[in-house]
Image: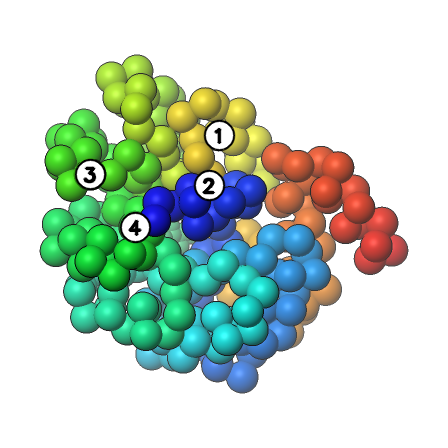
Amino acid sequence: MTATDVLGPHRIVPVVVLDDLARADDLGAALVAGGLPVAEVTFRTPAAGAVMGALAARGDLVVGAGTVITTEQVDLAHRAGATFVVSPGLSAAVVRRCQELDLAVLPGVCTASEIIAALDLGLDTVKFFPAEAYGGLATIKALAAAFPQVRFVPTGGITADSAPSYLAHRAIAAVGGSWMVAPDLLAAGRWDEVAARCAGAVGLYAPSASAELQGASS
Ligand SMILES: O=C(O)C(=O)C[C@H](O)[C@H](O)COP(=O)(O)O
């Protein structure tokens, strides 16, 4: 399974940091309402595995695990029902375990050497992280010239304002970002705002779908 197979038409990946399992279902409902039923749940909180499980159990979301740095986390994500795994860096052990379990995997890269290592592992889609800090689209363009067979999912510092220029480039499969699931929105239970920001995000690559969503919610 490749990352683009798993993501399907969705070209923005909400990156979630949630420490409160009780909020997972409301978050899932808001992502669905906003037309962006995708969540990369980062292993940055003790509740991450349970949050992944709760979101996956809904059955209407594509759920992935983020900040995965060990094979144990891959196994936990798999048991929780995640279908893709994202890592800030490239660990051959993590990639191979994902391949054994048929989980899509997006290892983080930011150099040509790391891209070559990803290609050696049989991958053609990688996360570019941390995107803005490592030169953003200009760096991806330079890397894509040398690796036309590779597609990138830049993440880190991307906003609703900067996402469109990334998404317009042929080498970009999708972008990751947290602006539609900002921790303060989740903590305050501002689910309408999460849904609205998701609909706005969808509008950055599928304007007609976003217009339908906005119409339905008004
Ligand atoms: O830890 C990981 O594996 C990550 O994926 C980190 C994410 O890239 C950032 O959390 C994105 O967050 P923003 O920069 O707020 O959009």
Q: Secondary structure at mark 1?
A: helix
Q: Amino acid at mark 3?
A: Gly
Q: Is residue 70 above or below residue 109?
A: below
Tell me, yes or no, whether the two marked residues, 1 and 4, touch with CB atoms within 8 Å.
no
How far apart are the alpha carbons under marks 2 and 1?
7 Å
Quadrant hosting residue 218: bottom right
Residue highlighted by disc 1: 166
Mark 1 or mark 2, which is nearer the start of the sequence? Answer: 1
Expressed as whole percent of the image width and height from the top left, the position of residue 118 reads 19, 38
**2 vs 3, front mark:** 3
Q: Secondary structure at mark 2?
A: strand
Identify which residue, 117 or 192, lies in the foreground.
117
Mark 3 or mark 4, which is nearer the start of the sequence? Answer: 4
How far apart are the alpha carbons under marks 3 and 1?
24 Å
Mark 4 or mark 2, which is nearer the start of the sequence? Answer: 4
Tell me, yes or no, whether the two marked residues, 2 and 3, touch with CB atoms within 8 Å.
no
Q: Is residue 186 left or right of residue 126?
A: right
Q: Amino acid at mark 1?
A: Tyr
How far apart are the alpha carbons under marks 2 and 4?
15 Å
Asked whether mark 4 lies closer than 8 Å to ligand 1, one says no
Q: Is residue 200 above or below residue 147?
A: below
Residue highlighted by disc 2: 175
Expressed as whole percent of the image width and height from the top left, the position of residue 67 reads 30, 59
Tell me, yes or no, whether the two marked residues, 2 and 1, touch with CB atoms within 8 Å.
yes
Residue highlighted by disc 4: 105
